[in-house]
Every structure is written in C-alpha cells, then in structure tokens.
Amino acid sequence: MVDMSQTIAPKSDQLNADDLIGGPRTITITRVTGNEGNAEQPVNVFFEGDNNKPYRPCKSMRRVMVKIWGADASQYVGKSMTLFRDPKVKWGGMEVGGIRISHMTGIDKPEQMALTETRSKRSPYTVRPLKVEDQRDRAAEWADDHVAGVAKARSAEELAEVIEGGVKALDRLQKTRPELHQRVVAAYEARRSELESVDAADAQAEDSGVGF
C-alpha cells in the first residue's frame, strides 16, 4: 500500500495546517516549552508521535487552551485535543488555512467563548468534549492482538494476509495513534526479516543436501 498522505506532508519544523489535509488528528501532549525569539508562535506543544515537529498554536488557540485547561502549561501533559485544518483562516487578507482545536479533554459539555476574528469583530467559538480513554484502550488492544497475529505468521504469504487484514485499522492509527502505528509497522518489518532468514537457511540446507 502506498500512503499518499506521506508524499504531501510539508517540510517544516512544526505541525502545519497542510499536515491535516487528510483529516483531523487527536494528539496527547507530552510537554510544553517556550519558543524563544518567535513572537507570533511563542509556544511549542510536543505530543506523542510528533517526530519533533511540535504544534505551535496561534494566539486564538492559546486562549482556548487557557480557557479550558488553565494558564499553567505544565498541567497540560497527558491531556488530549483534536486538531483540524480550517481552510477559512486568513493571513495577509488571503485564506491560507490554519490549525484549529475542535475537541479537548477535561470538559463534560461544549464550551463556548468569544474569539477575536478581526480588530473590530469577535465571533463565538465552541470546543466540544473529547472522550479518548476508551478509544485509546481499544486501539492499544487491537495493536496487541494484531502484533500477536503477525508473530504467528509462518510464511510470507500468511504475513501478507495478516497485514492486508489490518490495513484500514492501521490507517486510522497513523492519524490518531502514531506511536501504535510505528509499533505495528516495526512488527511487520521484524517478522518479515525473520521469515526471510528462515527461508534462506532452508534454501542453504537444501543446497547442501542436509537432511537427505
């Protein structure tokens, strides 16, 4: 399978709106640091599977985070939120797209606030509750079962069947749980290498006449 989303990812040191063209992404925060020397984007929000490309929220989204989670960024670790690409976000008067937050953990009902859209206009903005614990558990459970199935594959053909059966679920993991996605892909590569080694050993034994 060729993952086209990987071929259109922009080259950058941060998460960009274009990274979300394929759909929203739920992230779990691992740490928050200052981004010295960048007045427009003074905060780095690192998250699981970020590949050292943090999310740098704009001022409006920083206001959302403070409203929902408070001002102490050290308390954000372990919390989750869903990011999406809003194509209507403007820069220099042009619609270029930007990252917005749709859902956050820590709330049990939709939260509405007024955010500045232009100097003379404020618009209502709503953030909805994010329930991730059950989803994350199910994702981890699926990954465990799938990796176990990979380990049981006795041939390249059986491995191919196991991989084919997990294509759709793996695609979802790439967007929502990249760390699990990486783990599963690593299991594929490891089992494929093991099977190739066994095949090579069998071929060598056959050529040498061992066992005949």
Image (cartoon, grey):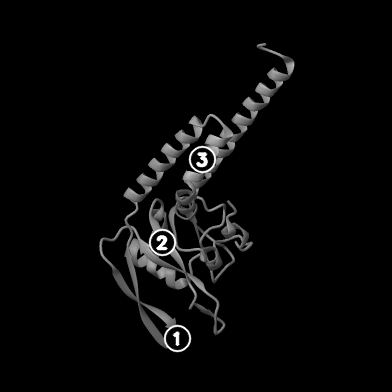
Q: Amino acid at mark 1?
A: Arg
The percent position of residue 115, horizontal first and vertical second, equals 38, 77
Could you tell whether 152 is left or right of 78 in the image? right
Instruction: In the displayed orientation, state which residue is furthest to the right.
Output: 208
Q: Amino acid at mark 2?
A: Thr
Task: Tell me the crowding category of disc 1: few under 14, some 14 to 19, or many 20 or more residues within 10 angstroms, Cα based.
Answer: few
Identify whether 70 is placed above or below 139.
below
Q: Earlier in the sequence, mark 1 or mark 3?
A: 1
Residue wearing tag 1:
119
Front in this rendered view, residue 180 or 162: 162
Task: Tell me the crowding category of disc 2: few under 14, some 14 to 19, or many 20 or more residues within 10 angstroms, Cα based.
Answer: many
Task: Tell me the crowding category of disc 3: few under 14, some 14 to 19, or many 20 or more residues within 10 angstroms, Cα based.
Answer: few
Residue wearing tag 3:
161
| Distance of label 1 from label 2 (alpha carbons) | 27 Å
Q: Are marks 3 and 2 in contact (CB under 8 Å)?
A: no
Q: Are marks 1 and 2 in contact (CB under 8 Å)?
A: no
The percent position of residue 63, horizontal first and vertical second, equals 40, 70
Residue wearing tag 2:
82
Identify whether 181 is placed above or below 119.
above
| Distance of label 3 from label 2 (alpha carbons) | 33 Å
